[in-house]
Image (spheres, rainbow, N blue to C red):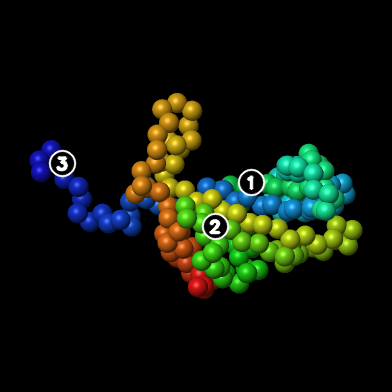
C-alpha cells in the first residue's frame, strides 16, 4: 500500500485508544427514607466524602405505610467524576473486599454495589449523625460516547463500541487485579 495508508499490523484490539473503557461517573446515593434531619445529615456525610454539594431527591408519590409524602425530600445523591471517582470506588470496593457478583453488572456494562455502613469508608463516626448505608453506581463509557448525547447531529453509538456485561466484568477484574478483585457466580 503506497502513500503510507497501510494500517500498522502491530496494532491489536488492546492498544486502540478509542476502544479503551473508562469510568464516566460515579453516583453515590443515600436513601434516608424520611425528610427532615435525617436526610440533611446524610447529605453532610456525602459532602464529607466527596467535597461536593449533594442534591436531594424527592418522593414521587405519597406512601402512607412508609410515612412519606409526595415531593418530600427523602434521599440525597452526588455525582463524582475523574480521579476522585476512582478513589472513592476503590474505598467502597475495599469494604466489599473487591468481590462483586455478576448481578452487580448491567447489560450495558454499568455496575453498582451497596455498603451498609458509611463509616467503613474511613469517615469518622459521628454520634449525632448516625450510620448510613449508601449505593455506589458506576457508569462506564468508551470514547465517542458523546455523539449520542450532544445536541446537534446526534448519532447512535455503534454496536461494536457499546460496552457489554462481559467486557465490563473483564475490565473490572483487570483494573483492580492487584487487589485480587473477582466477580463471583
In the rendered image, the quadrant that contains the N terminus is: top left
Q: Position of residue 8 (x, y in %)?
A: 20, 50
Judged by depth in the image, the label closer to the viewer, 1 or 3, is 1
Q: Which mark is residue 111?
A: 2
Where residue 100 sits, quadrant-wise, is bottom right
Mark 1 neighbour class, 10 Å CA radius: few under 14, some 14 to 19, many 20 or more: some
Q: Position of residue 170 (x, y in %)?
A: 43, 64
Judged by depth in the image, the label closer to the viewer, 2 or 3, is 2
Mark 2, secondary structure of its residue: strand
Circles 1, 3 touching at the beta carbon (< 8 Å): no
Marks 1 and 3, the one that precedes in the sequence:
3
- Would you place residue 11 above or below residue 180 in this image? above
Question: Between residues 20 and 59, which one lies in front from this camera angle?
Answer: 59
Seen in the image, is 91 located left or right of residue 116? left
Q: Please, which residue is most extreme toward the right here?
A: 128
Seen in the image, is 173 located left or right of residue 73? left
Whether residue 92 is visible to the viewer of this picture, yes or no, is yes
Q: CA distance from mark 2 to mark 3?
A: 42 Å
Residue at image point 45% right, 59% down: 165
Q: Position of residue 17 (x, y in %)?
A: 36, 49
Circles 2, 1 touching at the beta carbon (< 8 Å): no
Give the residue number, with chain letter if any, for mark 3.
4
Residue at image point 51% right, 56% down: 106
Mark 2 neighbour class, 10 Å CA radius: few under 14, some 14 to 19, many 20 or more: many
Q: Please, which residue is most extreme toward the top here?
A: 152
Marks 2 and 3, the one that precedes in the sequence:
3
Q: Please, which residue is most extreme toward the left here?
A: 2
- Would you place residue 88 above or below residue 53 in this image? below
Give the residue number, with chain letter if any, for mark 1.
79
Q: CA distance from mark 2 to mark 1?
A: 15 Å
Mark 3 neighbour class, 10 Å CA radius: few under 14, some 14 to 19, many 20 or more: few
Amino acid at each position: 500500500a503506497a502513500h503510507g495508508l497501510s494500517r500498522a499490523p502491530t496494532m491489536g484490539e488492546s492498544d486502540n485508544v478509542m476502544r479503551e473503557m473508562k469510568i464516566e461517573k460515579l453516583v453515590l446515593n443515600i436513601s434516608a427514607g424520611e425528610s427532615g434531619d435525617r436526610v440533611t445529615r446524610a447529605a453532610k456525610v456525602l459532602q464529607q466524602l466527596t467535597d461536593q454539594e449533594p442534591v436531594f431527591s424527592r418522593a414521587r408519590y405519597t406512601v402512607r405505610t412508609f410515612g412519606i409524602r409526595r415531593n418530600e425530600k427523602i434521599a440525597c445523591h452526588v455525582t463524582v467524576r475523574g480521579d476522585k471517582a476512582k478513589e472513592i470506588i476503590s474505598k467502597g470496593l475495599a469494604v466489599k473486599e473487591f468481590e462483586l457478583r455478576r448481578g452487580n453488572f448491567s447489560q450495558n456494562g454499568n455496575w453498582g454495589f451497596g455498603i451498609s455502613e458509611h463509616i467503613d469508608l474511613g469517615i469518622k463516626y459521628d454520634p449525632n449523625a448516625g450510620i448510613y448505608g449508601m449505593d455506589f453506581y458506576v457508569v462506564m463509557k468508551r470514547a465517542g460516547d458523546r455523539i449520542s448525547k450532544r445536541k446537534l447531529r446526534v448519532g447512535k453509538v455503534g454496536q461494536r463500541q457499546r460496552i457489554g456485561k462481559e467486557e465490563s466484568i473483564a475490565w473490572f477484574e483487570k483494573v483492580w487485579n492487584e487487589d485480587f478483585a473477582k466477580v463471583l457466580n
